[in-house]
Image (tube, grey):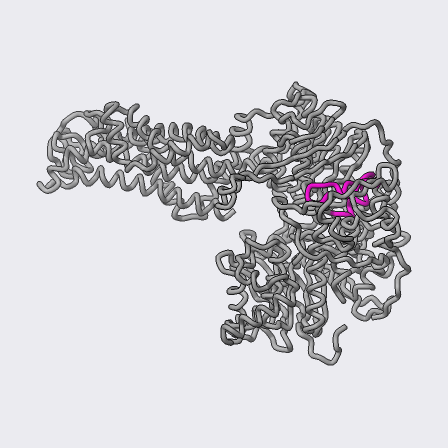
């Protein structure tokens, strides 16, 4: 059916116009817009946490306050306080900042490693591919939570170690995606053209192949941000997350879960809700991006 | 020709088809009328985007989610299809109207045996028993000349060749004895010798069963061979229609006329009578001009008249063809013979010293054989002889064409030259240095720069993520032509000038360009490093006729200017005859014949060259061809014939010697070599395949 759609010759776009356009494309997917809106909200909360958080997240003020109760100075605890008396809203906002920071750092690092491995495996093929694919399969065959617990238990709980654990566990999956796309793109004529002007393999991989793999990678990046958010929450819940007293959503649930049945369910449910909402945002955004990218 | 008393099988009047896109309704086909009588074969010609496939889909009432029939009627055997229920239309499809598409593999279910999917057709439409269906399928497969139908029925589609797949699709379409067969570019994906067989088969079958054909193609030569009448479409409208002879001999519409100027017919010559491309390009559907859609590209455009109201189609009364109609206000005023824009003749290029010499080059691939039998015998690696003893020379400024069908090893050869693969044996000397064994990473910048390539697929040749300017500039920088960014920019602009594209294209991304424009950028990129030799691997085969003509001329202009050696790899003999100085004919990895172009295109021929020449459709009714249709398939390169590779299909096979012994290289003239067992004297006596004759005046 190429016959009915003659080749269009649109006007040239500047990089800026292009960026705006690709965001504007999301407009066509209401689901994606909704997801993007959720993520954006958390990002804004994270960036402006010092201004937006009503209380200091770590200072005990009034224990066991319900949502709507007031502090001694008359300010309201919108979402109540926890068992030590810290404002839950402020802890969720500050915790969101840390979750977003570490999830982004971990996912990006996993991408750097996964992309390098995937490009090498897909472009060089041969034994490099076999070795890398073998290790990827070994790692991917572990139950992922067990893997995380093993790594964190070994190297200790800290932000940097969470990043390390995520890179270790996620990069094989990223590698597989990149490898598949690379295998396909490497057969294109423009790759042969680059080879016949004597370009080195890394130039070809990074300049000629990688930009053309961005479509599936952007979608996967959003999904993986969601997974990593869950992972950080789960590790926090298991006590392997970011060290206290700094707020951490998973840690908040663990600390207060004893009070869920004791008449204070909001202490644990609210941070759990925050995790779900952010992950939902990432997933919907990924869906929207996929939908939009399929259309063109 | 059709029996005039019968009611027409298909009657389309004033059909309008549209697609609905983000930009609103886009008319795809306008004011389309067509009548097909029983047994008649009607062609629909036009370049991509003209709406010819949309017509076929409209007839099938299959317009997808975003298309629809806006106006007009389609009557099938006198019944208006718009009044039929969904169920009736469904019954009609596949039973009374069958369609054959371009890609045979896409029409067959890969997970069902061929027998089972064919048997579905009569079982579904006629509810007959399985045994009956089986017998019918068997007969039909015999009718489409498939050897050993029994074995084929148990095979899966991927196990048979493309030509056989298309035969199966045709068998499937004909099983329900349709009254109308729609063929949408049915042979475009096939090799010419296979195409010739399929075309003959379709003609034979429709003659026997009285099936009417609507044949859609961009190939005017093919139309001449298969159709009684044709309609030429441009931008959604029929611009000219009539009997095949009147269209070919007295084309009235400037577009039809322009199309003929773009085709390398046998009398065209790259120096004396170069091709004349149609300027400009097809308007986008939502940017069609007022009045005549062809106006902006037309040499006879008259402001105030041609851009006024939309132009009705009128009868041409100057010839004796009552069906000849044209959509042009000035058809009667234009004297095409006199007004033919006399393309400037060009001085022939002077051939210089030998630049490239290939001597006894061999390229074998090893394929591991994991079958049990191979493991037992210990021979787990098989050799594919992709190139066997390739030898030829190419001089400065010379155009050498390498011709052959798919699987003949011509692309492998290009890869070896470019250093993407290494020769197994033999020499490839470029300016005296043997580069056959040097991988591309080990070649010096000079070697790389002096040998560049133009690729086949316009959509694949440019990196979609990088701007055009960056891609050309990178070559200039790599080869050290310029290093200063300002100068590189300047050189990019000059190259864009050379390939006749606006300078602002430097900022564009490939997806903002049309196929022809992409191919021009590909040419600019290849010539950016001032190469001595350029390999063009089917550079025009994916382009439309008028675009291909422009790209061909451009390529030769640049070659002439730079005195570049051009290796033109192609399956298209018409293009090769037009632009090559010397021709190398390959089959199954071996050279069958090589020599000057006129030597190769006239006797003595190699029998394969002869068959190839006969298979190529020529869009000139004055050309008489001897028909030679090859039987059988290309042998597997894993298991080639021991003697002459062509022996399994050769119509002139003389005996066991062909199967067992490698044919000798016979010298027909200086540097005209034929690899054949038949004696040169006999080959000399062969009649020419193509001859020019006085046109017979065939009254309609």
Point out the image quarter for the C terminus of chain B: bottom right
What span is in magenta?
B572-596
x then y, percent, for residue B625: 82, 57
Q: Is residue B30 magenta?
A: no
Which of the 4 image quadrants contains residue B25? bottom right
Q: Residue at x 51, y 56 (%)?
A: B110
Residue A169, placed above or below residue B313 = above
Q: Is residue B587 magenta?
A: yes
Q: Is residue B474 visible?
A: no
x then y, percent, for residue B687: 87, 54
x then y, percent, for residue B153: 55, 63
x then y, percent, for residue B487: 69, 21
Residue B118, placed above or below residue B617 = below
The residue most toward the top is B484
Task: Out of A262 and B595, give the one closest to the viewer.
Answer: B595
Q: Is residue B221 visible?
A: yes
């Amino acid at each position: 059916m190429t016959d009915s759609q003659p080749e269009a010759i649109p006007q040239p776009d500047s990089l800026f116009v292009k960026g705006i356009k690709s965001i504007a494309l999301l407009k066509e997917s209401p689901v994606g817009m909704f997801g993007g809106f959720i993520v954006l909200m958390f990002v804004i909360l994270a960036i402006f946490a010092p201004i937006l958080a009503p209380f200091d997240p770590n200072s005990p003020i009034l224990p066991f306050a319900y949502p709507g109760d007031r502090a001694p100075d008359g300010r309201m605890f919108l979402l109540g306080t926890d068992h030590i008396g810290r404002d839950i809203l402020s802890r969720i906002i500050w915790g969101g900042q840390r979750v977003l920071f570490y999830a982004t750092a971990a996912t990006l690092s996993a991408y750097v490693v996964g992309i390098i491995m995937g490009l090498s495996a897909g472009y060089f093929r041969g034994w490099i591919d076999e070795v890398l694919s073998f290790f990827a399969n070994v790692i991917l065959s572990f139950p992922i939570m067990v893997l995380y617990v093993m790594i964190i238990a070994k190297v200790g709980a800290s932000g940097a170690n969470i990043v390390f654990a995520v890179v270790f566990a996620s990069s094989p999956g990223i590698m597989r995606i990149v490898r598949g796309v690379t295998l396909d793109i490497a057969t294109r004529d423009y790759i042969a053209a680059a080879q016949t002007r004597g370009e080195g393999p890394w130039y070809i991989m990074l300049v000629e192949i990688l930009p053309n793999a961005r479509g599936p990678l952007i979608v996967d990046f959003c999904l993986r941000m969601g997974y990593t958010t869950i992972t950080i929450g789960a590790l926090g819940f298991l006590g392997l997350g970011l060290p206290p007293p700094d707020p951490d959503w998973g840690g908040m649930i663990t600390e207060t879960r004893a009070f869920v049945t004791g008449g204070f369910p909001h202490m644990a449910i609210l941070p759990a809700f925050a995790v779900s909402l952010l992950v939902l945002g990432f997933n919907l955004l990924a869906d929207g991006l996929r939908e939009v990218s399929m259309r063109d | 020709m059709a029996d005039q008393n019968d009611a027409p099988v298909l009657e389309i009047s004033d059909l309008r088809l549209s697609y609905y896109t983000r930009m609103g309704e886009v008319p795809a086909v306008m004011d389309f009328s067509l009548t097909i009588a029983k047994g008649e074969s009607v062609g629909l010609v036009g370049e991509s985007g003209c709406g010819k496939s949309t017509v076929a889909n409209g007839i099938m009432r299959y317009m997808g989610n975003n298309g629809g029939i806006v106006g007009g009627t389609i009557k099938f055997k006198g019944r208006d299809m718009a009044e039929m229920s969904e169920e009736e239309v469904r019954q009609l499809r596949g039973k009374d109207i069958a369609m054959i598409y371009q890609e045979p593999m896409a029409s067959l279910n890969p997970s069902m045996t061929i027998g089972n999917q064919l048997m579905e057709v009569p079982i579904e439409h006629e509810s007959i028993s399985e045994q009956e269906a089986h017998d019918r399928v068997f007969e039909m497969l015999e009718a489409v000349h498939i050897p050993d139908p029994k074995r084929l029925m148990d095979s899966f589609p991927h196990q048979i060749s493309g030509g056989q797949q298309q035969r199966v699709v045709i068998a499937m379409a004909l099983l329900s004895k349709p009254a109308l067969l729609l063929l949408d570019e049915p042979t475009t994906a096939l090799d010419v010798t296979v195409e010739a067989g399929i075309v003959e088969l379709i003609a034979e079958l429709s003659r026997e069963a009285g099936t009417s054909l609507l044949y859609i193609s961009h190939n005017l030569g093919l139309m001449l061979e298969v159709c009684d009448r044709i309609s030429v479409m441009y931008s959604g409208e029929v611009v000219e229609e009539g009997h095949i002879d009147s269209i070919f001999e007295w084309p009235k519409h400037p577009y039809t006329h322009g199309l003929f100027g773009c085709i390398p017919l046998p009398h065209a010559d790259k120096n004396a009578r170069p091709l004349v491309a149609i300027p400009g390009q097809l308007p986008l559907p939502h940017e069609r001009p007022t009045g005549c859609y062809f106006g902006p590209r037309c040499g006879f455009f008259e402001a105030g008249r041609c851009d006024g109201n939309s132009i009705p189609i009128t009868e041409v009364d100057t010839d004796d063809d009552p069906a000849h109609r044209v959509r042009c206000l000035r058809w009667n005023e234009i004297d095409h013979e006199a007004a033919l824009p006399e393309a400037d003749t060009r001085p022939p290029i002077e051939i210089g010293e030998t630049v490239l010499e290939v001597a006894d080059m061999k390229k074998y691939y090893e394929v591991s054989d994991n079958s049990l039998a191979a493991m037992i015998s210990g021979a787990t690696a098989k050799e594919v002889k992709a190139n066997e003893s390739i030898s030829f020379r190419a001089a400065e400024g010379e155009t050498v064409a390498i011709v052959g069908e798919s699987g003949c090893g011509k692309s492998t050869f290009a890869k070896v030259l470019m250093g993407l693969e290494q020769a197994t044996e033999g020499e490839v000397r470029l300016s005296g240095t043997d580069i056959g064994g040097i991988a591309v990473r080990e070649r010096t910048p000079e070697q790389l720069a002096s040998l560049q390539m133009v690729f086949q697929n316009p959509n694949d040749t440019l990196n979609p993520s990088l701007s055009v300017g960056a891609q050309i500039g990178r070559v200039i920088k790599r080869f050290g032509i310029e290093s200063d960014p300002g100068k590189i920019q300047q050189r990019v602009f000059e190259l864009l000038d050379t390939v006749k594209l606006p300078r602002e294209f430097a900022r564009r991304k490939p997806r903002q360009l049309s196929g022809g424009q992409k191919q021009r950028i590909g040419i600019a990129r290849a010539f950016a490093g001032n190469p001595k030799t350029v390999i063009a691997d089917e550079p025009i085969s994916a382009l439309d006729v008028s675009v291909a003509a422009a790209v061909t001329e451009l390529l030769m202009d640049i070659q002439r200017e730079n005195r570049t050696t051009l290796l033109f790899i192609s399956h298209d003999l018409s293009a090769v005859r037009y632009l090559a100085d010397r021709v190398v004919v390959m089959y199954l990895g071996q050279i069958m014949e090589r020599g000057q172009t006129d030597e190769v295109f006239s006797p003595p021929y190699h029998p394969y060259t002869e068959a190839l020449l006969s298979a190529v459709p020529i869009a000139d009714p004055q050309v008489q061809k001897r028909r030679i249709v090859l039987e059988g398939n290309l042998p597997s390169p894993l298991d080639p014939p021991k003697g002459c590779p062509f022996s399994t299909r050769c119509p002139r096979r003389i005996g066991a010697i062909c199967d067992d012994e490698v044919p000798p290289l016979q010298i027909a003239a200086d540097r005209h070599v034929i690899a054949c067992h038949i004696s040169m004297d006999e080959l000399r006596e062969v009649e020419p395949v193509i001859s020019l004759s006085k046109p017979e005046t065939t009254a309609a």
